[in-house]
């Protein structure tokens, strides 16, 4: 049985751990509020640019832009959004498991796919397993801007346009609520599902619809990636907040259990001392 000092030391160390996890929970909650606001603020922009792109694409039926055309798939690209740090529950493991399962089902060789990794966890995971990671971004701020991922987004879209691969899938955690984040697979390229939604305005194209699409389509694809990053960041902060709350609750339960164990052990020690004193007095009589 553990001594009173051992139990007391465990109680003190658990209390210190609980204070740390409680502080991390509060920090993540504060970051979540801003990240959720950023993600929601980006939705109207994405809706409008999708409306414009859909209207132009549908009005230009003779357009043969490579980003709008499906082609035989010889190589696939995967853009994976993870975090730079752990202590976020199953946030990273869920999305990495989904990507690896998809790769195993679709490919038999590493020559058939490439990986773009956003976040240190994803980069290290794929690198250690020998997957072809051709571009990665780490050290993103908690509230990222488009400039932070402009390079990797531009490269991912540009390589597709140049024909270096034939489709691009994106994997990230979609923010539903503070306690629910769903792993999402989204096909970014080719843009075969663009269609005008509802009643749209009438546009006049100058100089031409093809010239506008040449500029607008890459921006739209890059915006999809940035929107997923904002969504993923909100999910990351929510997952870390939930994980730290669970850790704090578990620490509180452990402290209660150890305190009860300590009191019982102390009571047993006191009872034993009283018994020894009574026995000593009886021996002197």
Image (spheres, helix red, strand yellow):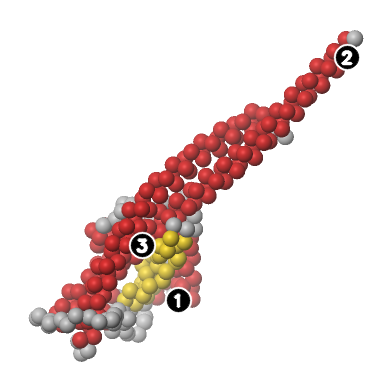
Left or right, 129 with respect to 154, comes to right
**Coordinates of residue 190 in the picture (x, y in percent):** 31, 79
Marks 2,1: beta carbons within 8 A = no
Between marks 3 and 1 in the image, the one whose residue lies nearer the viewer: 3
Q: Is residue 60 above or below residue 282?
A: below
**Coordinates of residue 276 in the picture (x, y in percent):** 81, 19
User: Nearer the N terminus, badge 2 or badge 3?
Assistant: 3
SS at mark 2 in the image: helix
User: Nearer the N terminus, badge 3 or badge 1?
Assistant: 1
Q: Residue at x 37, y 69 (%)?
A: 170
> Crowding at label 1, few (<14), some or many (≥20) Cα neighbours within 10 Å?
few
The answer to whether residue 268 of the structure is visible from this angle is yes
Residue 46, picture quadrant: bottom left
Checking the image for residue 107, the label placed there is 1
**Coordinates of residue 227 in the picture (x, y in percent):** 31, 65
Left or right, 274 with respect to 74, comes to right
> Crowding at label 3, few (<14), some or many (≥20) Cα neighbours within 10 Å?
many
Q: Residue furthest left?
A: 207
The answer to whether residue 222 of the structure is visible from this angle is no
Screen quadrant of the N terminus:
top right
Left or right, 90 with respect to 66, comes to right
Screen quadrant of the C terminus:
top right
SS at mark 1 in the image: loop
Question: Foreground: 140 or 250?
Answer: 250
Q: Residue furthest front?
A: 199
Disc 2 to disc 3, how far (Cα)? 76 Å
Disc 3 to disc 1, how far (Cα)? 28 Å
Q: Which residue is mark 2?
A: 282
Q: Which residue is mark 3?
A: 231
Q: Residue at x 27, y 67 (%)?
A: 44
Q: Residue furthest top?
A: 285
């Amino acid at each position: 049985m553990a001594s009173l000092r051992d139990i007391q030391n465990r109680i003190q160390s658990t209390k210190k751990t609980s204070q740390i996890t409680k502080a991390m929970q509060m920090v993540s909650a504060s970051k979540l509020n801003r990240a959720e606001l950023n993600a929601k603020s980006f939705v109207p922009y994405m809706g409008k640019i999708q409306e414009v792109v859909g209207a132009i694409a549908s009005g230009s039926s003779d357009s043969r832009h490579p980003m709008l055309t499906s082609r035989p798939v010889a190589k696939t690209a995967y853009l994976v959004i993870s975090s730079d740090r752990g202590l976020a529950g199953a946030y990273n493991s869920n999305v990495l498991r989904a990507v690896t399962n998809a790769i195993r089902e679709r490919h038999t060789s590493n020559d058939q796919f490439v990986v773009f990794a956003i976040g240190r966890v994803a980069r290290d995971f794929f690198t250690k397993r020998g997957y072809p990671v051709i571009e990665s971004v780490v050290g993103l701020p908690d509230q990222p801007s488009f400039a932070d991922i402009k390079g990797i987004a531009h490269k991912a879209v540009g390589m597709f346009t140049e024909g270096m691969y034939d489709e691009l899938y994106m994997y990230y955690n979609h923010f539903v609520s503070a306690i629910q984040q769903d792993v999402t697979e989204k096909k970014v390229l080719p843009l075969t599902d663009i269609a005008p939604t509802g009643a749209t305005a009438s546009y006049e194209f100058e100089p031409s619809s093809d010239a506008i699409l040449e500029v607008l389509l890459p921006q739209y694809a890059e915006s999809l990636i940035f929107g997923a990053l904002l969504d993923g960041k909100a999910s990351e902060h929510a997952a870390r907040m939930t994980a730290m709350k669970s850790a704090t609750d578990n620490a509180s339960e452990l402290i209660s259990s150890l305190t009860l164990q300590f009191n019982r052990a102390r009571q047993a020690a006191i009872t034993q001392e009283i018994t020894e004193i009574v026995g000593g007095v009886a021996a002197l009589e």
